[in-house]
Image: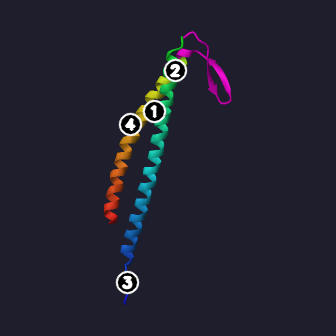
């Protein structure tokens, strides 16, 4: 039996290495975006649930916000407005990250096709 050995010249080796690196970068970026997307989604959900619980409480009620290891007295209306802002920003972040992930997935598929 004879083994067929394929010789690659330097240019082919460089192209192959470049494709491998770009695939690795695309996979890494995709994983980072997925992690950020899950984190932002969880933050938005947490803020929404907290806001829903606070909606049932009267605005005159004393409320405390956690700052590090201590709690500070804050007006309930201020806490609610901060939570609303957080929900809005997290929702916008989730939308932009989802769009960005779609673009990265397309680029990853293109690199995969080039690799094959």
From the viewer's side, name the closer residue of 110 and 3.
3
Per the rendering, the mark at residue 100 is none
Instruction: Report the span colored magenta.
Output: 59-77
N-terminal label among 4 and 1: 1
| Numbered label attached to residue 90 | 1
Q: Residues within 10 Å of mark 4 (few under 14, many from 20)?
A: some
How far is disc 3 from disc 2 in space, using C-alphas? 69 Å
**Label whose residue precedes the other's in the sequence (1 or 2):** 2
Q: Secondary structure at mark 2?
A: helix
Query: Rounded to the nearest whole Å, what is the CA distance between mark 4 and mark 3?
Result: 50 Å
Instruction: Determine if the magenta segment contains residue 88.
Output: no
Which of the 4 image quadrants contains residue 60?
top right
Residue placed farthest to the bottom in the image? 1
Marks 1,2: beta carbons within 8 A: no
In the rendering, at what x and y percent does residue 44 appear?
A: 47, 31
Q: Of helix, strand and loop, which one carries label 1?
A: helix
Can you tell which of label 1 and label 2 is closer to the viewer? 2
Is 53 on the left-hand or right-hand side of 2?
Answer: right
According to the picture, the residue beneath numbered tag 3 turns out to be: 5
Residue 96 x/y as whole percent: 39, 38
Distance CA(mark 1)–CA(mark 2) = 19 Å
- Residue for point 44% across, 46% down: 34
Q: Secondary structure at mark 3?
A: loop
Q: Which comes before the other along the chain, label 2 or label 4? A: 2
Tag in front: 3 or 2: 2
- The residue that disc 2 covers is 53
Residue in the image at 39% along x and 76% along y = 10
Q: Residues within 10 Å of mark 1 (few under 14, many from 20)?
A: many
Q: Identify the residue position indicated by label 4 in the image.
A: 95
Q: Which is closer to the viewer, label 2 or label 4? A: 2
Image position of 26 with respect to 6: above or below: above
């Amino acid at each position: 039996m004879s083994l067929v050995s394929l010789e690659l010249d330097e240019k082919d080796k460089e192209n192959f290495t470049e494709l491998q690196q770009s695939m690795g970068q695309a996979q890494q970026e995709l994983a980072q975006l997925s992690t950020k997307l899950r984190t932002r989604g969880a933050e938005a959900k947490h803020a929404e649930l907290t806001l829903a619980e606070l909606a049932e409480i009267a605005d005159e009620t004393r409320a405390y916000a956690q700052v590090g290891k201590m709690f500070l007295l804050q007006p309930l209306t201020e806490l609610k407005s901060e939570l609303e802002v957080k929900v809005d920003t997290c929702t916008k972040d989730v939308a932009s990250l989802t769009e960005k992930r779609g673009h990265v997935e397309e680029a990853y598929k293109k690199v995969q096709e080039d690799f094959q």
